[in-house]
Image: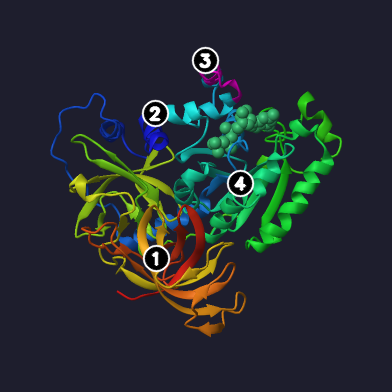
Amino acid sequence: MGNIAQRAKKATPTIKGVSSAVLDQRQLDLSGLNLLNNPPPKAEEAPKVTYARDKLLEEVRKSMEAQEKGLSLVVIGHVDAGKSTLMGRLLYELGRMDERTRTANERNSTKVGKSSFSWAWGLDGTAEERERGITMDIALQSFSTRHRLITVLDAPGHKEFIPNMISGASQADCALLVVDASTGEFETGFERGGQTREHLILTRSLGVAQVIVAVNKLDQVQWERDRYEDICILLRPFLVQSGFHPSKTKFVPVAAMLGVNLVTCGGDDAKQLREWYKGPTLVDLLDQLEPPSRDISAPMRMPISNIFKGQGSGTSVSGRLLSGVVQVGERVRILPGDETAVIKTIGVEEEYVPWAAAGSNLTLSLVSIDPVQLAVGSMLCSPADPVPLASSFTARILIFDIQVPIIAGAMVELFHHSRDVPATFSKLIATLDRTSGKVLKSNPRVLTKTSSAEVQITLRSSGPSATTRPIPLEPYAANKAMGRVLIRREGETIAAGVVMEILG
Ligand SMILES: Nc1nc2c(ncn2[C@@H]2O[C@H](COP(=O)(O)OP(=O)(O)OP(=O)(O)O)[C@@H](O)[C@H]2O)c(=O)[nH]1
């Protein structure tokens, strides 16, 4: 959880329209999350809500119309494609990283003999990440373009961190795929087993429909136009096959380390690129991303993706608000379990706010709750409209390019937002036509690669003594963001699907 916790530690939020006396108290609360010089614990008072629900919805609608259009972006791609470098350099070019931080990053990365990672230094937060030169957790940053406020989730490229990547992609509206144009490197990432393919399929399966492909490290191939175009030609059909509409797929040539064509295509380093490229920069493309529609009138749903336990001054949780609205003082139910908590503060983008709407990535500090009741993967929801708990359900799934076919009884890992639980394909109900969804065969014996099927999935206990705990899950028809699942087996993603019916 390094990065987000660090961000909370660094953040000194201000509250729009709130007096400084209140601000001080709230700032104290935030520093309380990080336990450094905490004042002695005090009994927590639960604040009261400000708005009646109708008034709040009205307020949210008004403000959404007036606001900068916000969206969250997951940065995906094969290990070492240059994702962290690209984000570090982009933040610097946009004035989100100051010169002092940049020099410190450069000095620190050189000190440990990893000077080529200096741009990634600020994003790859933990000591282990820096030592290994890879991203393990999801780093959260934000920046503004002319028309958009973009929250960035920098996902780890390394194969063993795919579960973190799933957690990142399930919080995103759009994706930035970084590919390495160097000779042989694009091919390695794109081969079976490379993360370029897997990340794209996963991201699309989790509902992300727009993607920008940054073809990076063009300096390594002498800025060759042919190399850039060959990569686009190889990727286009694969993107369509993975379910990205061509109109929602954009390509851009860049060299992240040199800062070429991120914000501008000026300067000496970009001279060779300018000879043949006259198109938009990366930021131009980011600025044109379509903001997604937000489901604000649906019941509140927020899966917990991180927890920061305080000593005395409450506990904070972070995650994406999938649907609905929340406000300070509101009581929320935590599922699974019977507990409720009261929202004391809402942090969005290093600012405290009185309310937040679907689509925002939030840090909520909670009171009137014993922190042991909170777990990563638990769901916060409105007490009046709790999420159903499921230990068995039917789903329509799309099977990936697997080598070992799936049979009834196959043991798998089920991923739903930040949660993963052991499960079994308890029944193979039917194979389906991939396009029309019509039943091709009832009760099939096996499911083979790239087929579509309806199956029954049942959770199982993780050990002989453990009992199976149902998880909060909803049919896709009731709540799109709540009804998507991914299925993995032995470290490989084998299928993605949508929940049809909760059986119990
Ligand atoms: N020549 C060149 N090297 C680059 C460029 N962008 C990144 N690199 C180098 O590529 C290496 C990997 O960069 P990272 O940004 O750490 O890659 P990543 O995709 O974030 O890697 P993971 O976090 O491990 O998935 C570093 O040595 C960078 O300096 C570029 O535009 N040109």
Circle 4: residue type? Leu
Q: How far apart are marks 1 and 2 (CA)?
A: 33 Å
Disc on the earlier residue, 1 or 3 = 3
Q: Ligand 1 appears in which quadrant?
A: top right
Could you tell me what secondary structure mostly forms the magenta stretch? helix
Q: How far apart are marks 3 and 2 (CA)?
A: 24 Å
Tell me which numbered mark, 1 or 4, is placed earlier along the sequence: 4
Q: Say above or below: 425 vs 104.
A: below
Badge 1 marks a residue whose secondary structure is loop
Q: Which amino acid does label 2 sit on?
A: Lys
337 or 346, which is in the foreground? 337
Label 1 sits on residue: 298
- Residue 10, which numbered label? 2
Foreground pick, 408 / 413: 408
The mark nearer the N terminus, 2 or 4, is 2
Residue 125 in sight: no
- In terms of sequence position, does the residue under pointer 3 or pointer 4 come before the other? 3
Q: What residue type is labelled 3?
A: Lys
What residue is drawn where x is 40% and y is 58%?
A: 413
What is the crowding at mark 4: few (fewer than 14 residues within 10 Å), some, or many (at least 20)? many
Q: Are marks 1 and 3 in contact (CB under 8 Å)?
A: no
**Mark 2 Cα-neighbour bin, 10 Å: few <14, some 14–19, many ≥20:** few
Q: Is residue 257 left or right of residue 330?
A: right
Rate crowding at label 1 as few (under 14), some (14 to 19) or many (20 or more) other CA atoms within 10 Å: some
Region in magenta: 104-116
Cα separation between marks 3 and 4: 31 Å
Cα–Cα gap, marks 1 and 3: 51 Å
Query: Residue 199: percent from the left, percent from the top?
Result: 57, 51
